[in-house]
Amino acid sequence: MKISLRIFAAVVIVFITQFVSCRDNDDALPALTMSGKGTFGCLINGKLWVPSGSYSGTHADMDYSSKDSVRVDIYAYSGDPTRKIYMSVVATPAIVANKDYYFNQSDQPGISVIYSSVSNSIGCVQKYATDGYVRFSKFGPSAGVISGIFQFTLPGSSCNGEVIVTQGRFDIGEINF
C-alpha cells in the first residue's frame, strides 16, 4: 500500500509540474533559436507581445540590388490588437553577424524602426528611435534564416507616451529576395 501511495504521489507531482510548465510557456517569449522557426517576440512597455490573431506573422525581405550594400527589412504583425513592428537595416558592404546596428539616426542613417498600433479604432505610429539596436546572430541567403535580438525606445508622440521595447528576438525562415 505504501508503494502505491508513493507512486500515486509521484505521478501527481509530475503531472502538476508539467501542467505548470506548459502554462508558463504560453506566457513567455519565444526561445532564442537560429533555425528559421518563424518566431518573434518582445516586451512592449513591460508586456509580452508575440504576433497572434487572425492576421499575424513574420517575414523578412533581403535586397542585394546595390553592389556595395545590403538591405534587410524585418516585419512582425498581429491582428489582435493590430500591431506592427518594422525594422530596416542597410549596411555597407554587408551585414555582419554579432554586430550591433544602432537605431539612433546620427551614426548609422540606414538603420530604422517603426512601431504602429491600432486599438479601438485609435491608431498611432512611432518611428525614429532615441536608442536601441538590432543584432543578427544568423544571417544570409545561404543560411535561409535571419535571426537575432533587438531593443529600442521610441519617444512619446501619437502613442500616448514613450514606447519601450525590450528582450526582442526573432528567428525568421520566410525570406523574400
Image (spheres, grey):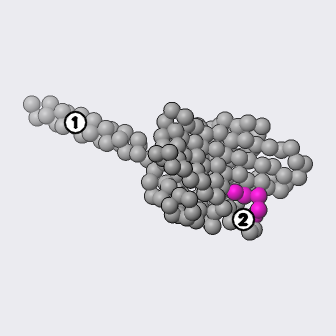
Q: Quadrant of the C terminus?
A: top right
Q: Position of residue 48 (x, y in %)?
A: 46, 50
Q: Is residue 30 left or right of residue 62?
A: left
Query: In this picture, is 125 found above or below 157?
Result: above
User: Is 65 inside the magenta-drawn segment?
Assistant: no
Camera-nearest residue between 121 and 48? 121
Give the amino acid type for the residue marked by disc 2 in the picture: Gln
Dot 2 corresponds to which residue?
A: 105
Q: Earlier in the sequence, mark 1 or mark 2?
A: 1
> Which residue corresponds to mark 1?
12
In the image, is 52 to the left or to the right of 141? left
What kind of element bears circle 2?
loop
Residue 145 pos. (x, y %): 68, 40
Distance Cα–Cα, label 1 vs label 2: 56 Å
Give coordinates of residue 95: x percent, y percent: 76, 53
Instruction: Name which residue lies at 57% across and 42% down.
Output: 77
Say which residue appears at 37% left-offset and 45% top-offset.
Answer: 24
Q: Nearer the viewer, residue 89 or 29?
A: 89
Please rate how many residues cluster around mark 1, counting C-alpha atoms within 10 Å: few if below 14, some from 14 to 19, many from 20.
Answer: few
| Magenta span dominant secondary structure | loop
The image quadrant of residue 131 is bottom right
Q: How many marks?
A: 2
Is 9 positioned to the left or the right of 90 in the image? left
Residue 135 shows in this picture: no
54 versus 47 height, above or below: above
Q: Is residue 11 left or right of residue 125?
A: left
Q: Residue furthest left?
A: 1
Chain part drawn in magenta? 108-112
In the rendered image, the quadrant that contains the N terminus is top left
Whether the residues at callouts 1 and 2 have beta carbons within 8 Å, the answer is no
The kind of residue on which mark 1 rests is Val
